[in-house]
Image: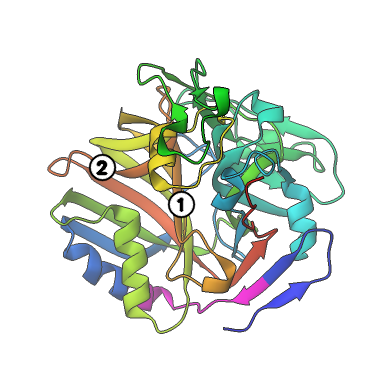
Amino acid sequence: MASTESVVALPVHNVPLHVPTDEQLCEVLSAALRSNFAEVEVNSAKCPDLTQPPWCLAVSGLGGDCRIADIGGTLNLEAPITRTLHYNLADVLQAIGKPSAHVMGPGAGYAGVAGINCELMATAQVVGSCSSVSSCSCSSSCSCTSDSESATEKQHLIRSQCAKIRDDCTTTRTEDGTDPKQDQCVETDPSSTYLLEPYSSLEVGPLMNLLISDGDPHSSVIHVRVRGRIGESNLVSCMREALDAGFGEVVGLAGVFQVLDGKVHAHVMPGFPACYLRTDAQVQQWLHFFEMSAPLTCLSVMVSRQIEELDLRVEHTHFYSDHGCGGHYHYDTTPETVVYEGYFVAAKTLHRVAQARPVPEE
């Protein structure tokens, strides 16, 4: 598939995506979900007001000039020198030629903002050529509305949240000449706990996956509601694999969903170790894993298949809640009782921004 490189401060590759009709998406997703869940409902629908709890987004809708962006990448987590990379979402929007937009999705927070590496759940209405910020820490009791929040026309509105390890207990085994390439270079304290808090900045860390749109509340969305998992795939993987099997071209889908009942397996990144993280075993030992309970509000971005030269993260989902749970979604752990409900839109363009590259060990 052809891609083009924009001449901007941030390197950007722009890839046109196949945009199926709502009817086609409903047909493909419904068939796949019925093989993985006991009860399935998929239809084209009007988007609910996503500024309201439990969603608490910065805008009321998902539609309008929808794009997805893959910024940085997991390779930036491998080497100490690239872990300090950070990006301003306003700069990203300028780089893709859409200076004003709603940005929403999962990624890594910037330690310069949060005080430590963290899981980020971004939702912000960015206004081009604007430097002032309005923010809101939202919960189920939040009384703010989109009208009151946008009273100052040229303010960015940020309602992002982050999850981080409360006590960073990461240690290393790199003293006394220990080889940092060994699997045992990282230890984490499994008893450490996490903290969910507001993140009132457009500065993000070394990786990010975003839905970028006008936040149009009048555009239709794909409504998905499922109950009782009978297959092996998590919700996001099931949907992404359905898109890959059902369409001959690359499809991008993003949106929000809730885990209404059940529990999920999740992780929260701790602070970075001093060593390189080269293997899956090292990464698994470094991450902190938890089981977290519904209700959970998830922000999800997926691409139906890999484009090898772009090293995409083909699916990525983070979540927050009104009871302190937040992090990176892996899968549900209660298949008999789990209930998911969400709203999704297809993207017309993929922007690969500042693609991460391998860094040789010194």
Position of 180 relative to 116 (above/below): below
Specify the amino acid type for callout 2.
Asp
Residue 148 visible from this viewpoint: yes
Residue 36 position, x and y percent, is 18, 60
Give the amino acid type for the residue marked by disc 1 in the picture.
Answer: His
Q: Find numbered disc 2 in the image and state the secondary structure of the residue it sits on.
A: strand
Q: Is residue 287 visible?
A: no
Where does residue 40 sit, x and y in percent of width and height?
21, 59
Magenta range is: 14-26
The disc at residue 332 is: 2
Q: Determine the residue positioned at 41% across, 55% down.
A: 343
The residue at the point 30 percent across, 54 percent down is 235
* Position of the N terminus by quadrant: bottom right
Residue 59 within the magenta-colored segment of the rendering = no
Earlier-in-chain disc, 1 versus 2: 1
Q: Disc 1 marks which residue?
A: 316
